[in-house]
Amino acid sequence: MSYPEHPLINIWAVIADPDIPDDVVERLIDRQAARRDGRTPNPVPEDDKPWLARHIAPTT
């Protein structure tokens, strides 16, 4: 399965999803904080992508 290079993830849906492992949520929050602070975020681990893909925000 392939994923967009920079999809928009609904972070609140990820946080609220009880099936997503805590470490996946923590890494997502760390990447969001890096963007907020003007730093380059760490790449998304391949193992995290299927979890996060569940909450890709639709584009209009």
Image (spheres, rainbow, N blue to C red):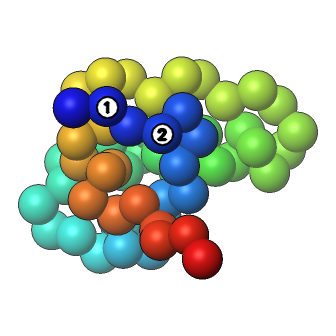
**Image quarter of residue 49:** top left
Which residue lies at the image location 88% right of the left edge and 39% below the top edge?
Answer: 38
Dot 1: element: loop
Q: In which quadrant of the rendered view does residue 27 lie?
A: top left
Can the viewer see residue 30? no
Residue depicted at 31% across the width and 31% down the height: 2
Compute the Cα span from label 2 to label 1.
7 Å
Q: Is residue 9 above or below residue 25?
A: below
Residue 3 image offset from top left, x and y in percent: 38, 37
Residue under label 2: 4
> Is residue 59 shown left or right of residue 17?
right
Q: Provide residue 55's location: percent of width, then percent of height.
A: 34, 64
Residue at 80%, 51% (x, y): give it. 36
Residue 2: mark in rendering = 1
Which amino acid is tagged 2?
Pro
How packed mark 1 is, by other alpha carbons closer than 10 Å (few <14, some 14-19, many 20 or more), is: few
> Could you tell me the amino acid type at mark 1?
Ser
Q: Quadrant of the N terminus?
A: top left
Label 2 element class: loop
Residue 16 shows in the view: yes
